[in-house]
Image: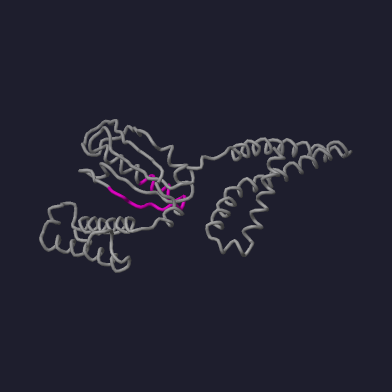
Amino acid sequence: MLDKLEAINVKFEDLTKQMNDPSAMNDMKRFIRLSKDYKELQPIIEAYGRYRSILSNIDHAKDIIYNEKDEEFRSMAKEELNTLTAEKDKLEEEIRLMLVPADPQDGKNAVVEIRAGTGGDEASLFAGDLYRMYSRFCEAKRWKIDLVDFTEGTMGGFKEIIFNVTGDGAYGQMKYESGVHRVQRQHVVVHHLGERAVAAGVAVRRAELDVEQRGRAEGPALRSAGALTLAAEVVTRAVAHAGADLRKAQRVGEVDGILDDVHLVFQRREDVDGGVGDDDGAI
């Protein structure tokens, strides 16, 4: 294992030299690739440094045990050797896991979909709890969450909610959440004693485009899709602002205001991009 770690250390040092080369900054695509490789190897190199230090201390403790005549020193060295050996075994196991080749897809962003299952309104509340739990987890990981779509439950929570998770290794960790989540919970909607089994389904898939691919994507079709997404966001925000009762959004003044906002979004996109798609941008 030491030979393998030393080879990785040589590669890491070479990456460090390349990143410090001023010419690397002139090619951003190459610099991003180097930075990604550097970040992936860094935990292994740190573990390798700790491992070498432990091996050195073990050799030193053994030397005291074999050559020291003072019994007290030898006793202390034996205790230290036992502690160092346990640390060495634990660290070796951690390093072996680090050396397992990672799935290249694990570094991508994730799309998470939560749907209420069995349990009616209680299931919607449970789906809402799951969303809040994942939100807190993503905040702790410093990942970004973007809502894509949602349908609120009658008594709260969500019948369905879809959101994007953007961050390093988001898909690699979130993919294990896929499946049916089931829980026994006290009744909230119906006020009587007892518990009820409720379930919610979670689906996690890879984001179609990573950050680098999204940056390279160009063309009228993408600009048109971007304008439509922006327009949809305007409508969603305006309707949400109208309140839970969607009939409030049907008042003529509010609907006219929403459509004006949508046309304004398209107009701004056309001014920047010189036209959206092949049509005239009318809705």
Q: In the orientation shown, which residue stands out farthest toward the bottom?
A: 271
In the figure, residue 88 lies in which quadrant? top right
Q: In the orientation shown, which residue stands out farthest toward the front?
A: 278
Nearer to us in this view, 213 or 19 = 213
In the figure, residue 185 lies in which quadrant? top left
Nearer to us in this view, 157 or 215 = 215
Percent x, y for residue 224? 29, 57
Percent x, y for residue 177? 41, 38
Percent x, y for residue 117? 28, 34
Residue 45 is a magenta residue? no
Which residue: 23% across, 35% down?
Answer: 120
In the figure, residue 176 lies in which quadrant? top left
Which residue: 26% across, 30% down?
Answer: 194
Stretch in magenta: 132-149
Which residue: 36% across, 43% down?
Answer: 112
Colour setting:
one colour
Residue 134 is a magenta residue? yes
Q: Quadrant of the C terminus?
A: bottom left
